[in-house]
Image (cartoon, rainbow, N blue to C red):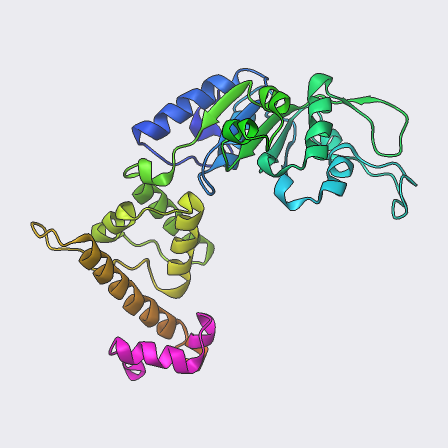
Amino acid sequence: MQALEALPFRIVGESPAFRRVIALLERIARSDAPLLIEGETGSGKEVAARAVHYGGARRTAPFVPINCGALPDALFEAELFGVERGAFTDARERRRGLVAEAEGGTLFLDEVDALAPKSQVALLRFLQDQSYRPLGSARECRGDVRLIAASNRPLEPLAAQGGYRQDLLYRLKVLHVELPPLRERGRDAALLAAHFAERFGRKYGAAAQPLDPSWLDWVVAQRWPGNIRELENWVHRQVLLGDAPVAPAAPVPGELPSHRDAKARALEAFEREFLLAALRHAQGNVSAAAQLVGKERRAFGKLLKKNAIDRRSIG
């Protein structure tokens, strides 16, 4: 595999769990077999798939993603294999499918667990020898793609319960990677938060500022059920609404508050800083700040009163 620095995107992390995954992806990239990536939502499955693609021999060919969960069952074969003109009422022109678009490269099937039984059969038939027929065509085509699939749910238990085809699972799971959730990656959450803060700051023209260590400690302590995507969105919001990401109140070293007290304190601090950031962004205009955060003006005013915030103090 190429050195990670040579990839067209940055992979962030230093934890042992993350390094094990990277080492496995490097080995997988040397082959061309189907790969199944499993992991919780937001854990970076598409990033892992892109790392395999751009680290392998197909790196100069297309990487084509498709979200199986967003496609109605009736459209899956048409999207995958293409459509001939006149194949059905609205097919006014010939259209290439995603297999043809990914020729020589990688086809990434995200949320493959969401495929309906009919679509599972169509995908299985293609995986057997990469031959297919566009809808409405009598000609057989052959594709040359590496197939990488991803699932938020483990497919083996799903197949054991009859909710997924066993034969398709075997075809998809020639190679397998399970991504660890962010809560099992230790300080990687702090590294990712700093990376996102820098990226969004650059995007919006904000000067880079050192991040408060207590803020990074707070980030690491959270469970982030939405994983990297949730953390990214949270940092994005902080950069938009304030001059820099805000550090919630941290306990004094040596004091160990209860989980409930620590959580309450962190939430109170976050709420206050969030309100102040919204007011600063709206230049002290309460109505504009309320609209910015999606609240009614009256409810927003109550929150200001609760947190003893005077809008006139906003410069």
* Picture coordinates of residue 94, whole percent (x, y): 87, 38
Residue 28 as seen in the image, left or right of residue 122 = left
* Picture coordinates of residue 166, whole percent (x, y): 60, 23
Residue 305 falls within the magenta-colored stretch = yes
Evaluate whether residue 272 shows in this view. yes
Determine whether 296 is above or below 293 in the image.
Answer: below
* Residue sitting nearer the eye, 277 or 85: 85
Q: Residue at x 62, y 37 (%)?
A: 65
Q: Residue at x 58, y 35 (%)?
A: 113
Q: Residue at x 47, y 42 (%)?
A: 41
Q: Residue furthest front?
A: 161
Evaluate whether residue 284 shows in this view. no
Magenta span: 290-315
Q: Residue furthest left?
A: 254
* Picture coordinates of residue 74, whole percent (x, y): 76, 42
Residue 96 as seen in the image, left or right of residue 61 = right
Q: Residue furthest right?
A: 86
- Look at the magenta stretch and give its main secondary structure: helix
Residue 162 falls within the magenta-colored stretch = no
* Picture coordinates of residue 172, whole percent (x, y): 59, 23
Determine whether 208 is above or below 299 in the image.
Answer: above
Q: Give the position of the C terminus as an image quadrant.
A: bottom left
Report the number of numbered marks: 0
* Residue sitting nearer the eye, 40 or 23: 40
Q: Residue at x 28, y 37 (%)?
A: 186
Residue 129 as seen in the image, left or right of residue 288 = right
